[in-house]
Structure formats: structure tokens, C-alpha cells
Image (tube, helix red, strand yellow):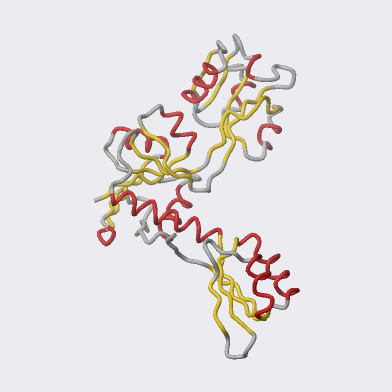
Amino acid sequence: MLRIAVPNKGSLSEPASAMLHEAGYRQRKDRRELVLVDSANDVEFFFLRPRDIAVYVGSGKLDIGITGRDLLLDSGSQAEEIMQLGFAGSTFRYATRPGTAKDVGDFGGMTIATSFSGLVTKHLADHGVDASVVHLDGAVETAIQLGVAEIIADVVETGTTLRNAGLEIIGEPILESEAVVIRRAGAPLDDPKVQQFLRRMQGVLVARRYVMMDYDIRVEHVERAVSLTPGLESPTVSPLHHEGWVAVRSMVPAQDAQRIMDELYELGARAILTTGIHACRL
């Protein structure tokens, strides 16, 4: 049975469970449930603190986990990223009071407060900067106001919270993070159960990015129409009862669907329809 760690709370929790549900797995109905056995799919889910998931997976106690890239790297565990999941995107940045520093090279002798001490310590070492790191949980922006540190390092989305605290973002991003699937470093990826899980998750990612488009068009315009809707491999083209017309079916990027429909219509296509894709295998 494949043993999978899933975030039990926070910004990773609901999107991860939603994606697993779309991939055909059972998910808990009660937030107090810590372990869920999906016997139909031969999987056991463990709902854990997001910060702990990399530790469990890195130790080999669990086979696979879903967590944030920032949490994975901060943990220092023997786990590695094997798939990007495309949600919970965030940027990890430094911030300070205006005029204190311009970039990481100016941090020598200063103190940096953060909830990601492992990640920041490594980043400073990679840049040859000798600075102190203070680990705090929670709202680290108050650390500067209270004199605990001159710099903070934290996840930044809009930057509004930092600006309200009188701080400015400085330097280049420390890390661009998102939700990822992790596996113990060096563990074989050719395990059939692991491969099946990854195929299902990849199928969800593709299904979310594409729609199925169907349309009718005159034979003489097929080549130009197909150039607009090439599909992943090749579109399906079928003759219609009315001579000189064909039906075309193809997967197209969801974000481009409206533009493609407009262009097909101008080309003479009619009965243009798009439908969502709930699951796929490529």
C-alpha cells in the first residue's frame, strides 16, 4: 500500500485534497481525521503538519508527500522534489526599513528574523555573508519594530503587510515556491504504485490546463483550422453527412480557447463547442 503525506491545514491543505479528489482518490470529510485508507486505490493517506511532511518522507517512513518547495528546502531532510503541482505559488524575499540595506551583500553583521531559518542560513552561506539568523514562528515583520532583527525573510504575496509595517522588499527573491510532490532522495521512481500516482496527478494538471474543442468546417479550410488547433498529437477529423464538411475535435489550452474560437469562426467554422476535461492520461 502506497503511504502518502498530505498537508492537514494551511494554504496547501484544501488545494492538495481537491487535486487528489480529482485524481480519483478518497479524501477525508472530517478535519480531525489523521489517517485515511483508500483500499480501492491501495493508498493510505496521512494528514500531517506541512512542515513535518518532508521529515517523514525523507526518513523513509512515508513513500510520497505533498508540501511546499520552501518547506522542503528549509527542512534539510533527505527528500527531493519529483513533480510540480502548480498551486500555492509564493515568493520568499528579504525586507527591512528603507535605507538599511539594498541586497544580501549588505547583511554582514546584521540579524535576520525568519520562520525559515534553514533556508535563510543556506542562502546567506551561498552568498558568503556572515549574519545571524533568529528563528521565529508567526508574523516576523514585528521583529524589526521590536528590535529583534534588522532584516526579515518571509513569504511575500502582494507585499501589503510589509508596506503597512513600514518595510520595503529588497534584493532578489530567495526562492520561488509552489506545491510539489516529494520522495525520499535516491528512492527508485520506477515503483509501479509511485508511477501510477504521478500519472494521475499529471492527468489532473493537464485536464486543468486544456479543454476539448469541437467544430465543423469546410474541407477546403481544414488545414488552416488544424493549424489553430493542432492538439497534443493530432486532431481527430471526421467526415459529416453533408458533403464538403468535416468535424474536428482537438484539445486546446483553456486560456486560449476564446481567441481560438473567434479565429475559427472567422475562418468559417460553425458549431464550435468547448467542454471541460475531468481526467486524462497522455
- Going 57% across and 30% down the picture, which residue do you hit? 154
Q: How many marks?
A: 0
Residue 81 in the figure: left or right of residue 130: left
Residue closer to the observer: 32 or 179: 179
Q: Looking at the image, which residue sits at the far bottom?
A: 242
Q: Where is residue 51 drawn, in percent x and y? A: 42, 35
| Residue shown at 33% from the left, 47% from the top | 4
Apparent side of residue 19 relative to residue 159 in the rendered image (left or right): left
Q: From the viewer's perspective, is residue 270 above or below residue 197?
A: below
Residue visible at 52% across and 62% down in the picture? 233
Residue 234 vs 81, above or below: the answer is below
Instruction: Please indicate whether residue 121 sits to the left or right of residue 34 in the image.
Output: right
Q: Is residue 254 above or below residue 92?
A: below
The quarter of the picture where residue 83 lies is: top left
Q: Position of residue 205 (x, y in %)?
A: 49, 55
> Is 114 left, or right, of 44 in this rendering?
right
Residue 131 x, y percent position in the rendering: 56, 12
Quadrant containing the C terminus in the rendered view: bottom left
Asked where in the image residue 230 lies, by quadrant, the reply is: bottom right
- Identified at 35% across, 39% down, the residue is 183
Nearer to us in this view, 155 or 232: 232
Identify the image quadrant of residue 174.
Answer: top right
In the image, residue 114 sits, relative to residue 64, either above or below, namely above
Q: Which of these two is toward me, 270 or 162?
A: 270
Q: Position of residue 172 (x, y in %)?
A: 65, 27
